[in-house]
């Protein structure tokens, strides 16, 4: 069984977040510390964690299935980095056997579409360069539960997302090492190493995603997450990280990275993960689910039924811009009728990470609808209404993501 202990690097980062809270004048006004326990769900309602993720914190998670595990809204805490034990899991196929981790450095990845194509081991990749980058990792279907037509797929609320620190080799450094790109490919295509069932068309199940070639500039091949070796649940031994792009484009168990003229012929590229209008058929003529849009949501107070008393409170949450940094966040306690500017707190880990925000408020007894709205540095504002689409992808509606609370 894999274990993921709390490491000193993350302790320092969480401590930095707490210090920033105090510096903003918010540290003594009722904010729950990152170490505060999340409310425990009813034991009778809980599904067990699958063996490959048994090391995670079950009390912080909702197990939808063996391959879909969601972070509870109340479990994000007040540290900017989402702890690995509380991070969501989404796998399109069951993960490979854990034996692939017996010798992580021996895992091989084929690099194609460069002037000197070759197969490299993880051990060799570690000699080519290294960077550390914080990104929001978010499932394309996060927020699907709020679509009124109840699209098929996991009914995620807000918890199929997290802010994660990755360490690995930049793709641009890898390409330079192999002589540069061969010609002018349009896409960067990553192929996962999951074991495919026999007797079926591989293209119908293969996890292979193509993104615009430009994404390679900030992309990396990661072998470490949150200052610890990557776990099987999150793509070990090697994962493609494409900052600003939804989770499906961050291919796990990476066995091939190719620079291609055409998009992958796999079903997951051609017909799945397409922004298909309600009255249309999903296919390659519809926009692919690639980059994330500005999004935010409230995480406290009152998440998951936690009691809230009348009086002074701190409304807090997380916000990100997708492809751009967060400029500011506004908060409303009356469902969007009136807004106030929140403070951005905690360390700024770069444009692809999320920012925590907090706003002191006075809450009267009764019902309140808490909502938040983020604007990025390019002037893009989180939308009020979702884009209704067949499969319930990329919902960034601030109204959908509101938190209704009862104050006593």
Image (cartoon, rainbow, N blue to C red):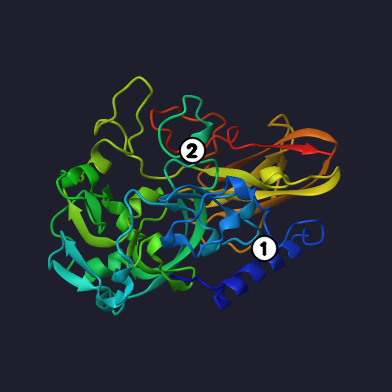
> Reading the chain from its start, which is encountered first: label 1 or label 2?
1
Name the residue rendered at 58%, 44% in the picture: 296
View extreme (front): residue: 44
Check disc 2: other Cα within 10 Å, few if <14, some if 14-19, many if 20+: many
Query: Is residue 390 in sight in this rendering?
Result: yes
Tell which tag, 1 or 2, sits nearer the viewer: 2
Q: State the residue in front, 7 or 325.
A: 7
Which image quarter is the C terminus in?
A: top right
Quarter of the rendering containing residue 369: top right
Q: Secondary structure at mark 2?
A: loop
User: Can you give x and y, in whole percent of width and height, for residue 208 in the image?
Assistant: 25, 50
Seen in the picture, residue 116 relative to 259 is either above or below; the reply is: below
View extreme (top): residue: 279
Which image quarter is the N terminus in?
A: bottom left
User: Can you give x and y, in whole percent of width and height, for residue 376 in the image?
Assistant: 54, 46
Residue 261 falls left or right of residue 90: left
Rounded to the nearest angstrom, the CA distance separating label 1 from label 2 is 27 Å
Question: Residue 131 — which label?
Answer: none
Residue 52 falls left or right of residue 184: right
Check disc 1: other Cα within 10 Å, few if <14, some if 14-19, many if 20+: some
Name the residue rendered at 29%, 25% in the picture: 281
Q: State the residue in front, 293 or 237.
A: 237
User: Can you give x and y, in whole percent of width and height, for residue 41 in the image?
Assistant: 64, 49
Query: Is residue 323 in sight in this rendering?
Result: no
Name the residue rendered at 35%, 66% in the picture: 236
Q: State the residue in front, 199 or 69.
A: 199
Q: Pointers 1 and 2 in contact (CB under 8 A)?
A: no
User: Can you give x and y, in whole percent of width and height, for residue 154 in the image?
Assistant: 44, 40
Seen in the picture, residue 289 relative to 131 is either above or below; the reply is: above
Residue 131 falls left or right of residue 176: right
Q: Which residue is mark 2?
A: 155
Question: Residue 34 — which label?
Answer: 1
């Amino acid at each position: 069984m894999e274990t993921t202990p709390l490491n000193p690097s993350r302790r320092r980062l969480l401590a930095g977040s707490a210090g920033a809270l105090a510096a903003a004048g918010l540290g003594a006004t009722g904010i729950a510390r990152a170490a505060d326990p999340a409310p425990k769900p009813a034991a009778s309602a809980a599904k067990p964690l699958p063996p490959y993720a048994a090391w995670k914190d079950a009390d912080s998670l909702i197990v939808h299935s063996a391959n879909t595990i969601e972070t509870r809204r109340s479990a994000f805490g007040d540290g900017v980095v989402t702890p690995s034990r509380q991070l969501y899991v989404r796998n399109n196929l069951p993960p490979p056997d854990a034996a692939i981790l017996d010798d992580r450095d021996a895992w091989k990845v084929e690099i194609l579409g460069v002037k000197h194509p070759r197969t490299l081991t993880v051990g060799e990749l570690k000699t080519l360069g290294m960077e550390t980058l914080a990104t929001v990792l978010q499932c394309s279907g996060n927020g699907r539960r709020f679509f009124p037509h109840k699209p098929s797929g996991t009914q995620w609320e807000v918890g199929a997302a997290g802010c994660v620190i990755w360490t690995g080799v930049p793709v641009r450094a890898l390409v330079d090492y192999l002589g540069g790109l061969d010609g002018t490919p349009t896409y960067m295509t990553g192929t996962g190493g999951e074991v495919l069932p026999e007797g079926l068309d591989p293209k119908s199940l293969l996890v292979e995603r193509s993104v615009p070639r430009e994404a390679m500039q900030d992309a990396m091949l990661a072998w470490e997450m949150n200052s610890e070796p990557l776990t099987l649940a999150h793509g070990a031994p090697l994962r493609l990280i494409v900052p600003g792009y939804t989770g499906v484009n961050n291919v796990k168990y990476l066995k091939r990275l190719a620079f291609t003229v055409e998009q992958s012929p796999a079903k997951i590229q051609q017909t799945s993960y397409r922004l298909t209008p309600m009255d249309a058929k999903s296919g390659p003529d519809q926009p692919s689910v690639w980059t994330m849009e500005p999004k935010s949501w409230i995480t406290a107070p009152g998440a998951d039924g936690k009691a809230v008393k009348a009086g002074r409170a701190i409304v807090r949450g997380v916000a990100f811009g997708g492809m751009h940094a967060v400029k500011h966040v506004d908060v409303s306690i009356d469902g969007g009728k009136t807004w106030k500017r929140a403070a951005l707190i905690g360390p700024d880990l770069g444009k692809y990470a999320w920012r925590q925000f907090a706003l002191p408020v006075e809450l009267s007894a009764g019902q309140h609808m808490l909502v938040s709205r983020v604007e990025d540095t390019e002037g893009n504002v989180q939308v009020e209404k979702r884009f209704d689409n067949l499969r319930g992808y990329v919902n960034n509606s601030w109204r959908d993501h509101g938190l209704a609370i009862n104050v006593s």
